[in-house]
Image (cartoon, rainbow, N blue to C red):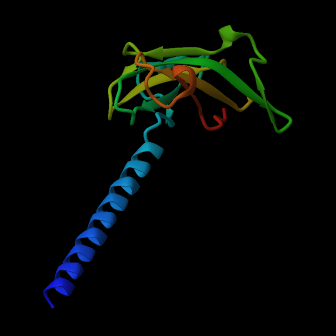
Amino acid sequence: MKKSGQRAVIIIVAVMGLLYVAGLLTCVRAQSRSANPTLQFLGVATNYLKYDKDRSWKTFSVSNAWPKTISYSVTEVDFRTNERWTSNSWPAASLMTRRESPGMVSPGSSDVFYAAIPNGVTPWRIHVLCSVTNRHFSWENGTYELISAEITP
């Protein structure tokens, strides 16, 4: 009877160990899916930029869920015409950006910036390129592109 009791204990410990390992793997996979930076449109600027008569400034936020500090920059603007997006269809000078930080986002934090095009009737969106100095991570070529939601005038 002693041997059957020892077997039961060994089986219970082995099953508990497997469940523990499965739980750890599930947590790691869930964290890796949410580790990318995100771009969010926050609305119309409410600071001094709201007084600009030639442009309607919009506020955006870049959030960093990655464990390393990232830098970001606005790289492109798209315009929607005839239900399709066209990249850089207007001169690059038509997109203006402002930020009150160096464009670096620490792990677990976010940064706000502003973007505007001349007042018009064409919906638009922006592309933001994020990068890290440490290349030992999952993004290809060390960069990650974010595209905003459609901004309507």
User: Going by the image, does 98 lie left or right of 7?
Assistant: right
Q: For the point 15% across and 91% down, which residue is it?
A: 1
Figure quadrant of residue 96? top right
Figure quadrant of residue 109? top left
Task: Inspect this view and state whether residue 89 appears.
Answer: yes
Figure quadrant of residue 110? top left
Q: Nearer the viewer, residue 143 or 39?
A: 143
Q: Nearer the viewer, residue 139 or 120?
A: 139
When the figure is inspected, residue 110 is found, relative to residue 133, above or below; the finding is: below
Task: Inspect this view and state whether residue 120 appears.
Answer: no
When the figure is inspected, residue 28 is found, relative to residue 37, above or below; the finding is: below
In percent of width and height, residue 12 lies at 25, 76
Q: For the point 61% across and 38% down, which residue is it?
A: 149
Give the quarter of the figure containing the C terminus.
Answer: top right
In percent of width and height, residue 24 lies at 33, 55
In percent of width and height, residue 123 lies at 71, 32
Q: Nearer the viewer, residue 74 or 71?
A: 71
Q: For the point 39% across and 36% down, which residue is it?
A: 65
Q: For the point 49% across and 31% down, which residue is it?
A: 138
Query: Quick one: which residue is furthest to the right in this view?
Result: 82
